[in-house]
Amino acid sequence: MMYKIELHFHTAQSSHCGKVPAEEGVRQYKEAGYSGIVVTDHFSRKERGGPGEHEWDEVCGRFLSGYRAAKQAAQGTDFQVLLGMEIRFPHDENDFLVYGFEEEFLREHPWIYMKELPDLKELAEKERLCIVQAHPFRLKCTLADTAYLHGIEVYNGNPRHDSHNDLAFQAAKERKVGMTVGSDYHQPEDLSERCAKFVQLPRTEQELAQMLRKGEFQI
């Protein structure tokens, strides 16, 4: 048996561009035969505000509300809900999917999205996180230095953007970095048939990150 996991999922509660409440998204993915999702709501100054605008605890609470709602919706079932993020730093419009952390990590690293990618990579090696650049060839995005990445999202299923998935695949192949896929779910029609499949179901955020870093899944 292979377990289907969505690696790129947004909620109406915690992403301004999300149109589907977390609870409804969980229902849709369960009905589609998925075994779990990773809630990767947006995490950036544009989305959350900066120092002096909000308290960090407030920022974290709002960011986590979609994940917590999804977790609650799946409670008592075998459907797995894990925490992730889609982080953006202030200097450009590149987005990075981060896997392997739990809620407390956010509180221990205030204003993490005000830093830079090399800072995140240093932290990722210490905490055993996994960093994947999302849709690097989409309009206004540029491929980051792959020395700071564990992977590239080579298939992004969002139908409202041309993510140039062919270029992402070629870049990952040429640079010999990991490849992931994701629906980039914001609306009901976004659920893609392409997904990551695991022989073993990751039960924790850390398990997922290590499986992704080691390539222990199929596209």
Image (cartoon, rainbow, N blue to C red):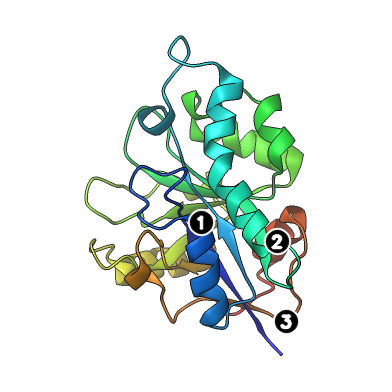
Residue 120 in view of the camera: yes
Determine the CA span between mark 1 and mark 2.
Answer: 20 Å
Vertically, is 13 above or below 169?
above
Vertically, is 192 above or below 43?
below
User: Residue 85 in the image: x percent, y percent?
Assistant: 54, 46
Q: Which residue is mark 1?
A: 22
Q: Is residue 197 left or right of residue 208?
A: left
Q: Nearer the viewer, residue 56 or 127?
A: 56
Q: Which residue is mark 2?
A: 208
Amino acid on which disc 3 is placed? Val
- Compare marks 2 and 3 and give the one earlier in the sequence: 3
User: Residue 209 in the image: x percent, y percent?
Assistant: 69, 57
Residue 102 image-quadrant placement: top right
Disc 3 crowd, CA 10 A, few/some/many (<14, 14-19, 20+)? few
Residue 207 image-quadrant placement: bottom right
Q: Is residue 120 left or right of residue 140?
A: right
Q: Nearer the viewer, residue 176 or 182?
A: 182
Residue at coordinates 35% horizontally, 30% vertically from top-left?
A: 46
Q: Quadrant of the N terminus?
A: bottom right
Amino acid on which disc 2 is placed? Leu
Of all residues, the one furthest to the top in this rendering is 52
Residue 35 image-quadrant placement: bottom right
Q: Which residue is mark 3?
A: 199
Determine the CA span between mark 3 and mark 1.
Answer: 26 Å
Element at label 3: loop
